[in-house]
Amino acid sequence: MKSGSDSRAAHRPLRVGLFGIGLDAYWPQFEGLKDRLEGYVGVVAGKLARPGVEIVNLGLIDNTAKALEAGDRLRAENVDLIFLYVTTYALSSTVLPVVRRAGVPVVVLNLQPERAIDYAEFNRMGDRTKMTGTWLAYCAACPVPELINVFHRSGIRAYQVTGVLRDDPHVDAEIDDWIEAARVAHVMAHNRLGVMGHYYAGMLDIYSDLTAQSAAFGTIIDFMEIDELAEIRRGLSAAEVDAMLARIALEFDIQPDCDPAELRRAAATAAALVKLADQRQLGSMAYFYTSVPDHEHEDLISSVILGCSLLTAAGVPVAGEYEIKNAQAMKIMDAFGAGGSFTEYYAIDFDDDIVLMGHDGPGHTKIAEGKTKVRPLQVYHGKVGKGVSVEMSVRHGPVTLLSVIERAGKVELLVAEGQSVPGPILEIGNTNSRYRFDMGARSFVEAWNSVGPAHHCAVGLGHIAGRIAKLARLLDLKITQVA
């Protein structure tokens, strides 16, 4: 999937600060050293450059006066993350003013120009001054302990990437992961989460502390009334409903036993949901409602599954049962480009050693194995009304599960990596998938439960636990990986 599918969330591009460090006392002593190191900073800037990311490149900082100016600029530019490239030995007093003033996490790039020094060639140089200048160009590792020590003592969150400046896949992958994590943190900080209705009564695990969610991610919580959705649906034209019906026919595999009247009802509600999300500029949503029999609101809430699935696939993930924490997890997964479908596990196949997971909708149709089916249901188990629902399995291959947990007012993340595997599923008009974990089904379920998540979680494509872990570090959240 394309990374970062939802464009609503970012009011400005991600801004990444970059500066290299050196020691101005070296420049008059070693001819060409400064130019060489400035060239290396340019190489790093090229590694960071990508669409949708603004690079604030401060060049080479080599004394405290420049450090103070650099810190002011990074603060004025409102950067989200700093990459500190260590070109050679430099004083920590040259670095602290920059990072402290900017007030954001820093990734220390400990990158030397080559995999190893050519000792024989180096020793043949003869001129010890030139030899020392060349040696200093390889001294990226030298000041890193000093810098990390000072960052720890200053309460600054700092992380490291160690390797070679060019042609080092590990370095390139780590830089990609850090930028992606920073981009998703930026998306979450600008996300508007719409909540409509109320909690599913009695599910104590899903109740959320909205202040804790806003504090952890920066989320804006937008309370909405179901009356607003009803008013929008009443105002739709026949042409708008027809257009949504056509979209549903294009994006779903409609089963022949679906009642055309139920499909049109779902299409009208879907069109209203899309309008509501556009008007409110939502980046995600959580909902649940019961109403009373034969009320307009019951008619609405019993026809939302197709519309919520369409929104989820369009970058506005929707969590049912008012599971706000899981809407956050789904948004994180979607922002990483992994999808993020609403799910829970309900049974274990001990013969095949797999965990069965799914839910009664909505589903993320873009991560489905094949086209998502639309089936009629005469009853929504545990909910009101009847109508049409979605049936899909998550695409076969590597997957990641993510749960957002609240514990005593603190937000945590729980993650696991597994495989979506083929095999029989229950054809009951729900999302249903089969997942295999290296540790085995029994051990996985016990390990996952022991961390204390709510029973819902988000599932997405690919193994991205490493990126989620970096996101947790940027947000200063505890994270647990169990598989």
Image (cartoon, grey):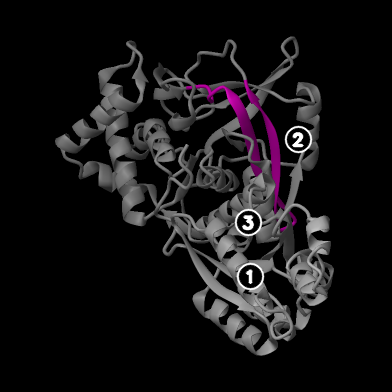
Q: In this picture, which residue range is highlighted in magenta?
A: 392-420
Residue 269 place in picture, x, y as percent: 31, 36
Q: Which residue is mark 3?
A: 209
Number of marks in picture: 3
Crowd tier of the residue under label 1, counting other residues whose Cα lies within 10 Å: few below 14, some 14–19, many 20 or above? few
Residue 413: in magenta span:
yes
Magenta includes 2?
no
Q: Give percent across and percent down for residue 413.
A: 69, 48
Residue drawn 26% across the image and 22% down it: 261
Quadrant of the rendering where the C terminus is positioned = top right
Q: Earlier in the sequence, mark 1 or mark 2?
A: 1
Instruction: Say whether residue 75 is left or right of residue 119.
Output: left
**Residue identifier under label 2:** 448
Q: Mark 3 is on which residue type?
A: Asp
Q: Amino acid at mark 1?
A: Arg
Q: Quadrant of residue 442?
A: top right
Sequence order check, earlier mark of 3 and 1: 1
**Residue at 64%, 48% in the rendered image:** 167
Instruction: State left or right for residue 442 relative to residue 412.
Output: right
Q: How far is disc 3 from disc 1 in space, using C-alphas?
A: 53 Å
310 left or right of 71 in image? left
Discs 2, 3 touching: Cβ within 8 Å? no
Q: Quadrant of residue 9?
A: bottom left
- Disc 1 element: helix
